[in-house]
Image (cartoon, grey):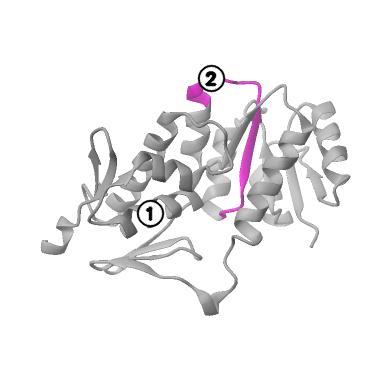
Amino acid sequence: MSYKIMIVEDDKNIAKLLSEYIERYEYQTLIVEEFDRVLEVFIEEKPDLVLLDVNLPKYDGYFWCAKIRQKSICPIIFISARDSEMNQVMAIESGADDYITKPFYYEVVLAKIKGQLRRVYGEYASKGIDTERVVQIEGLVMYPERSELHFQDKEIGLSKREVELLEVIIKKYPKVATREVLLEKLWDDESFVEENTLNVNITRVRKKLNELGIESAVETVRGSGYRLNITWRNS
């Protein structure tokens, strides 16, 4: 299968060089040139992965990342000259799966692409509806392959990382899911991850649970990690 990579980069030279390098490895590439139509192009072209710059005309990459994430769980990798921790946190909050700072090595970009495609579509991905997993506890039901979370008569979509986080926390109950276990599960292909990145993702999981009407479902165990609090069963 030839995967399609969508490149959203306003530096035409960088976009061209990225496209040429990626296509050497039998991927298709699509360079976006109309930066006010990023979401429209995404919907029309249905790429398998998006490479996204932060500094773009009119709307920045965070804006477009959030818009794409509302429509798809397609992997999104930021490539940006902004190298601060806050920029990386903002990318994660917007729904990104990875963040690469400029200047970069093309080999690293390709490795990141391969890793994300493998996680979402390859040997680590779901093998079909017949083997669909269900993770549930006290009326809270999660379908990892669908990236859906259900509670009573409500349902909400989750990002891939939110699914992975919540699955670990649920399966560890009533024990604590340590920070080390969560980081190993989520970023096993990373050599270094900012501690604050995990905090940001936990905040996103809590927000999704709140939207289902479940408050204080994930409690922080100081110095250790996180534990599920199923007090909603008595409500």
Q: Quadrant of the C terminus?
A: bottom left
Q: CA distance from mark 2 to mark 1?
A: 29 Å
Taking the image as drawn, is residue 8 in sight?
Answer: no
Residue drawn at 67 percent across, 41 percent down: 112
Circle 2 SS class: loop
- Which mark is on residue 84? 2
Asked whether the beta carbons under mark 2 and mark 1 sit within 8 Å of each other, the answer is: no
Residue drawn at 56 percent across, 42 percent down: 97
Circle 1 SS class: helix
Residue 170: image location, x then y, percent:
32, 58
Considering depth in this image, is 210 or 39 the residue closer to the camera? 210
Q: Is residue 81 above or below residue 207?
A: above
Image mark count: 2
In the rendered view, does 136 fall on the left or right side of 67?
A: left
Magenta range: 72-87
Taking the image as drawn, is residue 212 in sight?
Answer: yes
Residue position for label 1: 168
In the rendered view, does 190 fall on the left or right side of 216?
A: right
The residue lying furthest to the bottom in this view is 130
Residue 116: image location, x then y, percent:
64, 49
Q: Is residue 159 above or below residue 90?
A: below
Q: Quadrant of the N terminus?
A: bottom right
The residue lying furthest to the left in this view is 234
Crowd class of label 2 (few under 14; some 14 to 19; many from 20; radius 10 Å): few
| Residue type, label 2 | Ser
